[in-house]
Image (cartoon, rainbow, N blue to C red):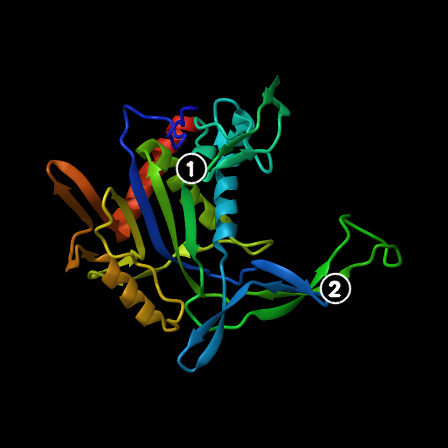
Amino acid sequence: MATVEISSGLAQVDNEPRYHYDIYAILEAPQELYFGHETQVNVNVVETVRVPTDDGTIEKCYMSPTKRRGVERRSLIWAPVQSDGVLLGDKLGCGIPHTCTQIECPICAVYGGLIPSATDVEVMGKKSKRQPATTIGRLVHGGGVAIQELEPSEKQRAMHPSMLHKDPGADPTPTPFKREYNEPALLYPVYNHCMSITESEFQAVAYAYLDSHARLGAGNPKGVKIYEAEWQTALQPLLVVDRYLAPLGKRPVLSPQISKIQQAVDAFCSAATSVRNKPTTEAHTKIEEDDTTVFERWIGDAALTELQNYSVNFALAYLK
């Protein structure tokens, strides 16, 4: 009888412990955004979801978690490497759709990768053959249902020829079309969850998370920011970062049925400041049991600083 190997396939690390990490936030769009869904009779339609309520069903704009994931991955692929004058994805031979699947790759290690069949590749002038392989992503994305009940707005646009000047009678002529947009000032509760990753692996997650905020949205305009509100006597970003072995903090995940901004902010802050079902006023909460740190939570400005520190460490490790 053959011996069955019981293994997750994830390489053992001796110098760094693994933890679970969570990032929770409410994002604000300072301008209209387009998150494409489909085209209907010359109208580019944005994604929406239907949410049941006690009074019936409401429709809300939606920032798809899969779209956020794609933008984050591209933030890493297109990150500039100073010493080589290339982008990180080019240096690693990792891109879209051809990912490298190498566990040493800071992109595939957390976002996952797939090579469906043997493929000849050339990376920085060196040719090689990559065998079929799969790396399961250990980062998942959630949320994205807008808080306010605001329907998309529809605007007229014109698709122009890709030349600086065309005579009035020459073809092709500008093609008018209509496009829906998510209204400005919509708020989107989102979260990222990382399963069993090291601190050095989380550096890539933090970098991609912060860097992607300027690029969310299809076409133009783009960009969101972390929403700020009065929180514990100061104006702070609605942001929470957890690192843990045991999930001891309430998850600041908002119900899509909430449509009032203040109700959403109160619910987020209440969950963010609850650890082991007890309120906390600390910007950084640390729980230890038997000399082992089982849970840590950073909130507000402290959480943003923590993500920024991880981002700097990623840049120093891979981009200098």
The residue shown at (45%, 39%) is 137
**Vertical side of 1 occupied by 73: above or below:** below
Q: Secondary structure at mark 2?
A: strand
Question: Would you name the residue on which mark 2 appears?
Answer: 176
Q: Depth check: 116 or 176 in front?
A: 116
Residue 191 shown left or right of residue 45 in the figure: left
Distance of mark 2 from mark 1, alpha carbons? 42 Å
User: In which quadrant of the rendered image does the N terminus lie?
Assistant: top left
**Labelled pair 2, 1 in contact (Cβ < 8 Å):** no
Q: Depth check: 220 or 108 in front?
A: 108
In the current view of this chain or complex, which residue is farthest to the right? 169
Residue type, numbered disc 1: Val
Across and down, in percent, residue 75 comes to 49, 40
Q: Which is closer to the viewer, label 2 or label 1?
A: 1
Q: Disc number at residue 110? A: 1
Residue type, numbered disc 2: Pro
Q: Quadrant of residue 255?
A: bottom left
Q: Residues within 10 Å of mark 1 (few under 14, many from 20)?
A: many
Counting residues from the start of the chain, the first of labels 2 and 1 encountered is 1
The residue shown at (67%, 62%) is 39
Q: Residues within 10 Å of mark 2 (few under 14, many from 20)?
A: few
Q: Quadrant of residue 120?
A: top right
Across and down, in percent, residue 73 comes to 49, 41
Residue 107 in view: no
**Vertical side of 19 occupied by 33: above or below:** below
